[in-house]
Amino acid sequence: MLFLLGAAGALQAQPPLFTDALPKEEFAARRARVMEQIGDAVVVVQGTTETSSYEKFRQSNQFFYLSGIEVPRAILVIDGRTKSSALYIAPRDERMERSEGPLLAPGSDAEKLTGIERVLPREQFAADAKTLDGRVVYTTFRGETVGAGTPDREASHKRAREADPWDQMPSREDWFMKKLGAQAKVEFRNLDPILDAMRMIKSPREIALIRESTRIAGQGLMEAMRSAEPGMYEYELEAIADYVFKKNNAQGIAYFALVAAGRNASWPHYHASQALIRDGDLVLFDYAPDYKYYASDVTRMFPINGRFTADQRELYGTYVRLYNAIMTSVRPGKVSAIMPEIVKKMDAIVASTTFANPKNRDAATRFVEGYRTRAQAGNATSLGHMVGMEVHDVTVPFDELKPGMIFTIEPAMTIPDDRVYIRLEDVLLVTPAGYENLSAFAPIEPDAVETLMAEHGFAEKRSKPTAAVREPREP
């Protein structure tokens, strides 16, 4: 009986051989859209490798987007001429399976699971590559991104590597094209712009995944706000979100945590998380998970002691009103038409606000003038950055917002001489009628922030005498 129960438990615990993030039909539809755009050409892309450390495998984003395959060193071929695809993966490794569990292996079972017409041993790719002679081959030119990677970070890493005389190894993408070009005479073209354009408009299932990633991000920061108190270290607040992320089945982080107390917030990407947080500090908290290959990006600011000072409330409250002027202007259409509307709303807000501190008035004025300049320039990226499989998601040139786009707004208001930095960030879905704020449940209004912080946090060190009467919540 014990043996039978153990066997049944082992079967139930077997890791999935194919992703549960999205159904195979969604990946097949993406490959079909690629075929429509490449004509008689062929796509050949490689997935990422295993790492040299004991960490869970995560596929590179472009490869996962087309396949959903989560095994290392896979190669995918999408043939525009035959309207079919082939996947090349390593054969079964029974020794490894006895240690780590089964992985997807070549054969008919894998074809049924993945929806890919042929799933073949990887060693067969070298021979099949010779049949591509004379074909146009689309492949990824940009370096792969995995986990917390983004195209902008990959580009900066590439520049650093190329500038370093001691680090002149070619990229995996360059080496792959060189090897494939030695097998067959082909013309290489860049696949990235095609995939990037597809990825800018999210499907309903993708929206659902980003919505969940955003929910987890918001719950993490809200739990940190509930537990926050003077005398904590930045890393303690970060750890609270880490727990919430893990508890909600995040596979990792979308980017390193930006938990910045006081003047540390003036460094926009400060991530050391080592400072002691003192009474009176404002804390910037910007952190989100990698959930089933989709990211989020939510930022909140709060007073560590749970109460804004009068000066903090004046500056932060003004910022919130200006911030809402941006958000409430979002809708489908030309960005060049949206930006002047934002500036008009902002002008009215500043004109109707009485400032006790002239530095706060000057900060608000500079903030508005920055948007006025961008409105005159007509820059479509003035509103924020795209979010999707990466926190700074792929983008192709665009001049209008379309339903299905997801992006963040994250403007900063600063008093540089005092190293004061105020910033929020929300994840916005463009809808046919306007927008939906996916992170709206995480409060930004000063009174709502204080109310949330008066609640009991599961990681607080001392009970709050002014806390609302409620049981500690489990995130």
Image: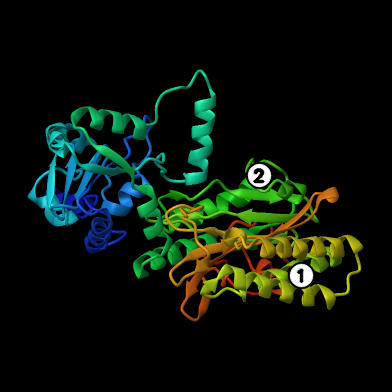
Disc 1 is placed on an element classified as helix
Q: Residues within 10 Å of mark 1 (few under 14, many from 20)?
A: some
Whether residue 369 sits left or right of residue 426 in the image: it is: right
Disc 2 is placed on an element classified as loop
Mark 1 is on which residue type?
Gly
Q: Is residue 306 above or below residue 337?
A: above
The quarter of the displayed image where residue 133 is located: top left
Mark sitting earlier along the chain (1/2): 2
- Residue 461 visible (yes or no): no
Which residue is at the front of the view, 458 or 125?
Answer: 125
Residue 270, numbered label: 2
Residue underneath mark 1: 317
- Residue 48 visible (yes or no): yes
Q: Are marks 1 and 2 in contact (CB under 8 Å)?
A: no
Q: Residue at x 52, y 48 (%)?
A: 255
Q: Is residue 159 above or below residue 457?
A: above
- Give coordinates of residue 216: x percent, y percent: 48, 61
Say how the picture is coloured.
rainbow
Whether residue 39 sits left or right of residue 278 in the image: it is: left
Q: Residue at x 88, y 70 (%)?
A: 355
Mark 2 is on which residue type?
Tyr
Whether residue 273 sits left or right of residue 133 in the image: it is: right
Which residue is at the front of the view, 429 or 36?
Answer: 36
How many marks can you see?
2
Q: Residue furthest left?
A: 108
Which residue is at the front of the view, 82 or 247?
Answer: 82
